[in-house]
Image: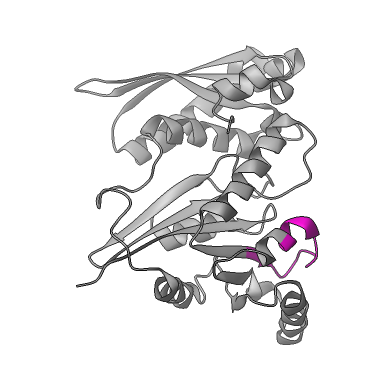
Amino acid sequence: MSHKAGFVSIVGNPNVGKSTLMNLLVGERLSIITSKAQTTRHKILGIVNKEDHQLVFSDTPGVLEPNYKLQESMLKFSKSALIDADIILYLTDTVETAAKNADFIKEVAAAQVPVLLVINKVDLSTQEGLEALTDQWKTLLPNAEIYPVSALHKFNVDQLYQRILELTPESPPYFDKDALTDKPERFFVSEIIREKILLYYQKEIPYSVEVVVEEFKETPKRVNISASIHVARDSQKGILIGHQGKALKKLGTEARRAIETFLDRKVFLQLYVKVSKDWRNQDNFLKNFGYDQ
């Protein structure tokens, strides 16, 4: 029996539903999801293994004009996904302006692999609005096949998956058939903590933090985890900790519960807050945090 395998890159602007769609296609919650833009910072692989195929989906940061070095690195992740792909899913939605980030769209249009233009959130549009939007995208990406979906309501996602499979080349698997992702458990623990920060803190705080797991030690009874939350300024440290440490305690409780669900193990979690001055523009910090290319 022939076997198919390929890399499927999901790219697009911030907040259009890339992480939600990948989690649906993979069938596991790998990428964190919040209503805030720039939630995804790294390229995260989610691997689907079936007897006759292996699809390697790649969730990428939202495309934006960089304001600091961290965002420059995030843009590199998105652009590299175009090069690595056997199939490109360019995800947009019914809310955003079609021609936003026109330069990146031109790179997608120039790709030498199949492009599927996925219009998400069709539940928020009318038939007339969707038809008008489709006409705009036919001009911007003339060679792309267009798939209207609602990732939130799982509309048309199965049909999209089947089309991806049809376009996937014949190949042996690229990863072990029991692999789910290329990232270690420590990475997802740090992402869970960062997700809680995105949910519970406002304004600049979520975008100014990076989470590093310093210790991940498994014992017969539980997993002992120690993590540092790096902030860019002294004032942000005080906000994260809160009055008498209450905000940090709440963060730790919520993160621990989510990590226990993810690992299916009891967890002891310790959180520390460190000031790493202007880390988003410092090459040494970005390299240590895994943002170097």
**Residue nearer the viewer, 209 or 109:** 109
| Quadrant (top left, top right, bottom left, bottom right) of the N terminus | bottom left
Where is residue 200 shown, x and y percent of the image? 63, 35
Q: In the image, is 172 to the left or to the right of 145?
A: left
Where is residue 236 shown, x and y percent of the image? 72, 20
Q: In the image, is 196 to the left or to the right of 102?
A: left
Q: Residue at x 55, y 63 (%)?
A: 88
Where is residue 275 shown, x and y percent of the image? 67, 13
Does residue 37 show up magenta in the picture?
A: no
| Quadrant (top left, top right, bottom left, bottom right) of the C terminus | top right
Where is residue 16 shown, x and y percent of the image? 66, 59
Q: Which residues are magenta?
A: 91-106
Q: Is residue 29 visible?
A: no
Does residue 105 show up magenta in the picture?
A: yes
**Residue nearer the viewer, 286 or 273:** 286
**Residue nearer the viewer, 104 or 260:** 104
Q: Residue at x 68, y 67 (%)?
A: 109
Q: Is residue 63 visible?
A: yes
In the figure, 222 relative to 100: above or below?
above
In the rendered image, which quarter is residue 225 located in?
A: top left
**Residue nearer the viewer, 255 or 157:** 157
